[in-house]
Amino acid sequence: MQKITQQLQKTAEGYALTLRRPYRAAYGFGEKFDSVDQKGKYVRACVREKCFYQGEYTYCSMPFLLTPDGFGLYADTYVEVDFDLSTEGEITLSFREGSCGERAEVYLFEGTPKQIITQFRTLTGMPRLFPKWALGAWMSANRWHTQEELEEQRMLTRQHNFPHNVMVVEPWSDLTTHYLWNGSVVPHKEGNEYASLEEMTFGDPWQDPKALIDGLHADGLHLLLWLVPIYAQGVNIESGWNVPQCLSDNEYVKAHGECVLNADGTPYEIPHTWCIGSMVPDFTDPVGREHWFNRFRYLKELGIDGFKTDGGEFIHEPTVKFHDGTTGREGQNRYCEDYTAGFAEFIGEQGIVFSRAGGQKSPSFTVLWAGDQESTWSEFRSVLKAGLSAGLSGFSCWGFDIAGFSGYLPSAELYLRAVQTAAFVPVMQWHSDPVSNGRCDFTGAWQINDRSPWNIAAFHKSGELLGLFRKQFFLHYNLLPYQYALMQEAHETGIPPMRHLMLEFPEDERCFGVEDEFMLGSALLVAPVLEDYTECRTVYLPAGVWYDLFTGERYAGGRTYEVALCEEHCPVFLREGRAVPLNLKGGALCSDVGNRLDGYEELTFLVSGEGTAEFEDDLGNRIAVRWTQNTFETVRNDRGIPVHVMHTKAREL
């Protein structure tokens, strides 16, 4: 890693640098929906909210790229950076001068793609090792308005036998303050004083949040609450519970300047997109930041486990100013980081924040989801590209809304194939948009937008479909020991669990353009089904020997295959010489092991060929194993936990 800042040239608007060096592909840039390889394009590193069909826009942007040709680039700045990749053998980056007149530090990384990611993350912060429960299944909705509805969802997960570990609730707060439970009664507070839990009483529609949260915890569920960083300026005032509190909050913020300001010193108000007219808290102001988080402290006393930090893309004007002297030129990209980092610090090491917006430091404190998609096949294909590019930028814990969260309910095939893909992704989540948003036309008996697996199966009148969905949730939990081990690796090296094939096979040029497969760690190759009405899909297997995860069929690598599809699963292949730690019951994949995270039914190593492997978890287990085609030996087992083995049988194709 070396600084090449001295190569920057002053331009009329800022600075520019051109690196002349041959390269065959360019990856990174945060999270990209249009393609993983951005070579030949003009890429703008800029955070931008785009609802549905994101195309070239992204919620999560980084001025970083890496190539399979031994180098990568990073501009350490939050001002908008443009990368011109349109000229063969050249990369030009340019950016406007920052508000303080500083020049960005530009770094050149040398090495393999994995080494480049490690260097980049060493500079910007390694991915956080999140609590293991973040890897369980998630359920979420923007339509659960009452405590009874949440209790019903908890009951339905048990009734249909779908393990979950996370519940995300969006419409929990009133529509004025955005921090008090809807229906709560508090003594009115002036200035920067906020009600304590002891002073609050609760009523319809949330009668007893503490009992609710305690009940969820007893079932192994963790609760996240949705929020946006705004002071509501008249938004839904007429329908809110706490109008006096909201108005006094806003007057205090205005009087003390505890918000992002316009150049003339007046409060900045969001001009367009959504939350229009609201003021925005300034997280660079220590006093204002403290006052902001004081309002949420009672939620920690209730026992909530984190926040879905939506809406980090609210800085639309380059002239606005922050307490630390920066302006909107930096704020457009940095604000989402300041916001989510603040909530990550607030909730602490046992909790998480879940965001769609971010930047180069975000993997150090944020679980990322791919934002808003409709239920279409093209959206499904785009989120896979987003996940691959996010991983290449250093995100370890990423997920997407299964089959989209909005529009008409997904087809049975789309939901099934999305569930099968999500089983191998760190965050497996379904989410639902409310019908009131007007994004679909539900009629008859289906006047709710419920994307739960049981409702989708009922909508398509198929009990068999429900069973297929359930097996994928079981498989996700079977894989949890492997996923957690990969999260540990990411925390130490920056290498993500979900990997573009190029990361594992940087010498194989045929991998460079593969954007419809991914490696889960170094052992499993997953080939999602991304089209409707198809009986087979093309799969490229890199060099080596591979085994079908479910049938044991043997494939020679370095070749492309037309693989027949089945309803039960998408194509997945185990790489010879690798081991995958699993939690199984009865030695079977897709077996029900529940949602417990404090032990295993059967800790099982799935192995093929011959090799060695080490495994360490958060429970104190440290295990080393070695094996051949016919033998398996545990050479280290610190706690003496029972260890099982499942040899992949080498059946010729």
Image (cartoon, rainbow, N blue to C red):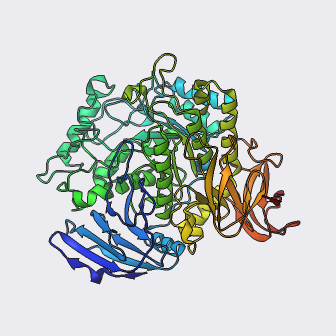
Which residue does the image show at 22% across and 79% down from the upper left?
Answer: 9
Q: In which quarter of the image is the C terminus?
A: bottom right
Against 476, residue 237 (above or below) is above
Residue at the spot 65% in from the left edge and 65% down from the top edge: 559
To which quarter of the image does residue 27 belong? bottom left
Question: Is residue 124 visible in the rendered structure shown here?
Answer: yes
Counting from the top left corner in percent of width and height, residue 287 is at 29, 53
> Would you place residue 217 above or below residue 73 in this image?
above
Above-or-below relation of 237 to 533:
above
Closest to the observer, 242 or 232: 232
Q: Residue pushed farthest right?
A: 630
Q: In this view, does 64 lie above or below 164?
A: below
Residue 600 seen in render: no
The residue at 54%/23% (across/down) is 148
- As drawn, the residue found furthest toward the left would be 264
Across and down, in percent, residue 442 comes to: 45, 22
Q: Position of residue 272 (x, y in %)?
A: 23, 41
Total marks in image: 0
Q: Where is residue 589 in the image (x, y as percent from the top left)?
A: 76, 48
Residue drawn at x 31%, y 58% as measured from the top left: 46
Q: Nearer the viewer, residue 233 or 524?
A: 524
Q: In which quarter of the image is the N terminus?
A: bottom left
Query: Which residue occupies the extreme top position in the image?
Result: 444
